[in-house]
Amino acid sequence: MSIGSVPLATTDLKIVEGDRKNSTMICAPVMAETVDEMLIQMGKAKELGADLAEVRIDYLKNFSLRSDLSILIKQAPLPTLITYRPKWEGGEYDGDESQRRDALRLAMELGADFIDIELKVAQEFYNSIKKRPEKVKIIVSSHNYENTPTVEEIGNLVATIQATGADIVKVATTAVDITDNARIFQILVHSQVPTIAVAMDERGLMSRILSAKYGGFLTFGSIEAGEVSAPGQPTIKELLELYNFRQIAADTKVHGVIGKPISHSKSPHLYNSAFRALGFNGIYLPLLVDGVANFINTYSSPDFVGYSYTIPHKEDGLRCCDEIDPIAKEIGAISCMIRRPTDGKLMGYNVDYLGAIAAIEEALRASNGAPASSSPLAGKLFVVMGAGGAGKALAYGGYEKGARVVVANRTYAKAKELASKVGGQAITLDELKDFHPEEGMILANTTSVGMKPRIEDSPLPKEALKRYSLVFDAIYTPKWTRLLQEAKECGAIVVFGTEMFINQAFVQVERFTGLPAPKQLMRDVLARNT
């Protein structure tokens, strides 16, 4: 079966732009030191599209109880959730506990919409309320900054919180592994009362976004990047514009890019923009995965339907497939996985080489006017740096086009193993700097050397680059890697990783949605984000 005949995902789920598909609110934490600054921040949060503001009065300096609370609640441009978090629960307040409770009771009297009280002191707080205003809803919260307990333990915790008389349950845990989010989703799905459940840290990001799919009462979005009330919080803008938060529904199909690291990835920008433009009911997430098999086994529901694979998981992904396209099998790595809707089987494909080889051929043709009928790579000495998933794809792609392939890798054994599959030569990366059998060679870097944050690094000294007529770098963050900058200075044609990235993204969007990729839109989105 050729790559062109891949079965496509179902397209029976459509969204209408502008419709709100869930009731999960976006809450903006406000953490300024003065009342005036808090009011300004609330105004910004409203402009950005937040539904309510969490007013963190534990951040206020020189807090004047009645007057400050009155201004914050009565002049707030958004509904207010008043939180006075003590140090012992991860907040800033370090004073008398009875004064803290007094402040929260006063916030209720002054017309706050919600107040947050920690489980540890919830019973005493309830006992101290003489007359409760009808309007206010009480959130009883528990924060675990160490890990995410078992489903049974979280279930018991939720039951304990409910027993206090809480109007809304809040459970925040810490995601040590991305599979921890599954326990958060179970809590949301089975909750009998309105529930806020999130896993903190980068591995918990999906819990914050998919709370809209699983019926969370609210999720938190920061006003500015970096100014978060808990680790792993996205911004309001990211929730609304990058993840199309309002369009997430209970039947939204989940896709993502599996890698480690993953925060640098531009894939969510491309795929979510494409899904939105196509009216496709899907979301695409950055997935920081430590173990692929554990991830796949945990998220086995029919709604988790498609993944892109990046460093270092392309080979592990292949081992998790039920069926593998012959080309991916030959390469020994996948870049795309789709759950077949008819039987739930996981299908693996490799589209990396299509994107990269097409970009290299295009650049060679533009420079020497080679006819479109034959590949300008034919007969060329094609040096591939790295023997991982992307290296295998490039080596195989070069071999398919008639190039003489040389594989250079840190460990010789891996280079030899790959080179033998494509009738090529193997050398180590150390040997490559003195490798000079002929002029006008073509170089493709598939190692991570030079990727953000280590942008000063290059996998090859500048002096060695003079022997190459074209240099391609699979890295696309940054676009201009040090390798490409120095190759250009040496007079070589340079081909950006963004070209490989965009070409294979077109293919994957079509596989995920069953619809033609909006190519120009995706190019524009990538240009804005690189």
Image (tube, grey):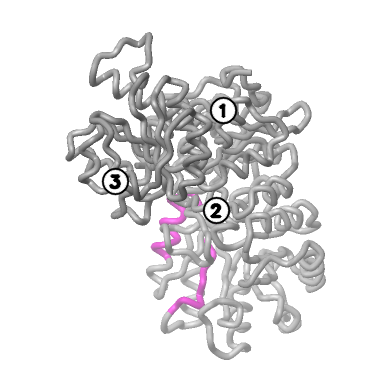
Q: Reading the chain from its start, which is encountered first: label 1 or label 3?
A: 1
Front residue of 317/305: it is: 317
Q: Residues within 10 Å of mark 2 (few under 14, many from 20)?
A: some
Front residue of 252/335: it is: 335
Amino acid type indicated by mark 1? Gly
**Residue at the location (66% across, 30% down)?**
324
User: What SS does tag 3 mark?
Assistant: loop
Contact (CB < 8 A) between labels 1 and 2? no
Q: Quadrant of the N terminus?
A: top right
Front residue of 83/360: it is: 360
Task: Name the side, left or right, on which 60 lies relative to 133.
Answer: left
The spot of residue 214 in percent (x, y) is 70, 48
Between the C-alphas of marks 2 and 3, the distance is 57 Å
User: What SS does tag 2 mark?
Assistant: loop
Amino acid type indicated by mark 2? Asp
User: What SS does tag 1 mark?
Assistant: loop
Amino acid type indicated by mark 3? Lys
Q: Determine which residue is flagged by label 3.
A: 433
Front residue of 251/437: it is: 437
Q: Determine which residue is flagged by label 2.
A: 51
Q: Determine which residue is flagged by label 1.
A: 279
**Residue at the location (39% across, 74% down)?**
34
The magenta stretch is 39-60
Q: Residues within 10 Å of mark 1 (few under 14, many from 20)?
A: some
